[in-house]
Image (cartoon, helix red, strand yellow):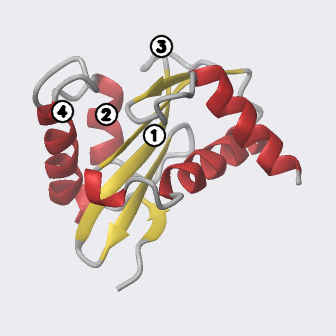
Amino acid sequence: MAVVVSLFSGVDRESLVQAIDEVCGEGGWMQTTHFEPSLAWQHALEVPDLPHHLLLVARDGGRVGGWCRLFPRDYPKPSDNFELGIGLLPAYRGQGLGQEMVGRALDWALAHRIGHVAVSYTHLRAHETVLDLVCRLLLAKKK
């Protein structure tokens, strides 16, 4: 079955939390060794279809292989200052899924007139910095 990038829905919750826990457990990517949801994460997991956040998943059948989130940094206060975060399980890295999800998140940010997007990343190529990644994705979007 092909991996499909789509909006998070309630049926993805358990698999998404498992995927986040797996990436946390790898060490070195996340601040914790298991998923400790912030208020913004809790809200996104409970009410996935709100217009002031974006949560995408890379779905492989019933399994979530990765995610990309765009949440207000000052949640629950209204803000145009957002943070983008992304994570992929090892089996799903290097296939362009991260680029697809980040591109869709940046499109969403532009459509919603988000003023500032900070990047919190879990997987970059060894030679990339956050600036390189964002610039590469923005250049790719212009083509």
Question: At 22% from the left edge and 42% from the top edge, which residue is drawn?
Answer: 20
Foreground label between 4 and 2: 4
List x then y, in percent, for residue 87: 36, 41
Type of residue at label 1? Arg
Say which residue label 1 marks. Answer: 69
List x then y, in percent, for residue 121: 44, 28
Say which residue label 2 marks. Answer: 41
Check if mark 3's residue and mark 1's residue have beta carbons within 8 Å: no
Say which residue label 3 marks. Answer: 74
Q: Residues within 10 Å of mark 4 (few under 14, many from 20)?
A: many
Q: CA distance from mark 4 to mark 2?
A: 15 Å
Foreground label between 3 and 1: 1
Mark toward the start of the polypeptide (2 vs 1)? 2
Quadrant hosting residue 130: top right
Q: CA distance from mark 2 to mark 1?
A: 9 Å
Which secondary structure lies at badge 2? helix
